[in-house]
Image (spheres, grey):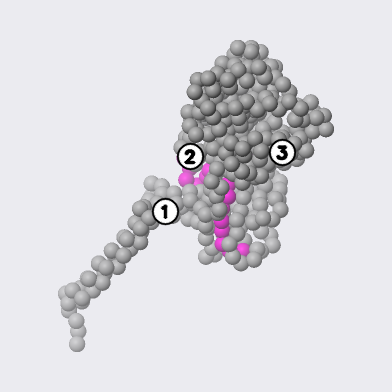
Amino acid sequence: MQTSPHAFLRRALPALLAAMLMTCLLSWADGSPAAARTGFTGTTGKAAAPGQPGDPNIKFVGRWDTTGSATAYTPYWAGAYYRAGFTGRTVKLKQRNTIDLWARIDNGPVRFYDDVKGTVNLTPTALSPGNHTLQVNYQVVAGSYKGDAVFQGLVLDSGATTFAPPAPARTIEFVGDSITVGTTSSQNARTAYGWLIGERLGTEHTQIAQGGACLVAAADGCVGLERQFTKLNPNAATPDWNFSRYRADAVVINLGTNDAGHGVSAAQFQSAYGSLLRKVRAAYPQAWIFALETFRGRFVPQTEAAVKAAVAGGDARVSFVDTTGWLGSGDLTDSVHPNDRGHRVIADRLAPVIAARIGS
């Protein structure tokens, strides 16, 4: 006996409505639609596929331009990196053009990839089945990326996916010049004191630093971090950085080494340092700010005076760090830049100072 279409609809409609209702409830169970939970939603309304820029399971640490393109993310400043969890046995990295990079899978060794581009195979030997983690950072020279530091996504096994890796709850930001970049150390940003301290204390870490940078912008072209601290790009006047992207729990400032060679007066330096302290405080209202004495002892009275003025003005979460005697001649590759041992010495001295304020 045939069933009329109307009778079929009368019987099927309740089940269909129930299924639709269940889909809505599951999608909104965490307060957001399914597309929003899965990742970046562009003008097409489609969520980013696992491993692609916009995948929320990829955590981009530092100042990344994620607005210019939904298919390519670009890092600025020295210490940017990203982490992701992934399943399957292999992972490849899509790079637009030639770049040097460092990659680490799980707790294995950090591997250097020299002048690679296109699809970069990070697992020439397949991994064991299961969950894995990946961390990648691009090589810097004097604070600029050597090559085309543009992330275009991961290539995973068929059927594999990503997951959010364990994430530290705190972030430390290091503001400085080539010393903070790690110039002349074996792995640059990775072997600089800021990276070492962040890893030691179990925090995220950023290096808002540029080789040759001054505190005060100079007419001869010295990048002034009092001005550029608030920017996405150390070498561009716009755009401003969106400080809601992450919150720093501590900020370490190490500036003044280069200003002496660019005609900056003591009064200019002190005024600019006070201005930078105010900008850092506006960006991170709860952060503890550490103003380091420069390792070459330049503008020390002015740095300390700016800190005292900030404290007198009501900022109780800023302190001057006396670094006298921290580094010896064996800790330097030249008269200015620490070698690997020197950066470890700084980390040994400074990490406990930071931990005492924000917890270890």
Kindly tell me whether residue 186 is visible in this rendering: yes
Is disc 1 placed on a helix, strand or loop?
A: helix
Q: Quadrant of residue 259?
A: top right
Amino acid carrying mark 3 in the image: Asp
Sequence order check, earlier mark of 1 and 2: 1
- Image spot of residue 257 (x, y percent): 69, 22
What kind of element bears circle 2? helix
Residue 81 falls within the magenta-colored stretch: yes
The label number, if any, that marks residue 37 in the structure image: 1
Left or right: residue 186 compared with residue 27: right
**x, y percentage for residue 12?**
23, 74
Q: Main secondary structure of the magenta part?
A: strand
Q: Which residues are magenta?
A: 67-89
Residue position marked by numbered label 2 in the rendering: 245
Which residue is located at x 38 percent, y 46 percent? 43
Q: Is residue 145 at all visible to an observer of this figure?
A: no
Discs 3/1, front? 3
Q: Position of residue 200 (x, y in %)?
A: 66, 44
User: How many angstroms separate mark 2 from mark 3 (CA)?
Assistant: 30 Å
Label 3 residue SS: helix
Mark carried by residue 348: 3
Q: Is residue 90 above or below residue 56?
A: below
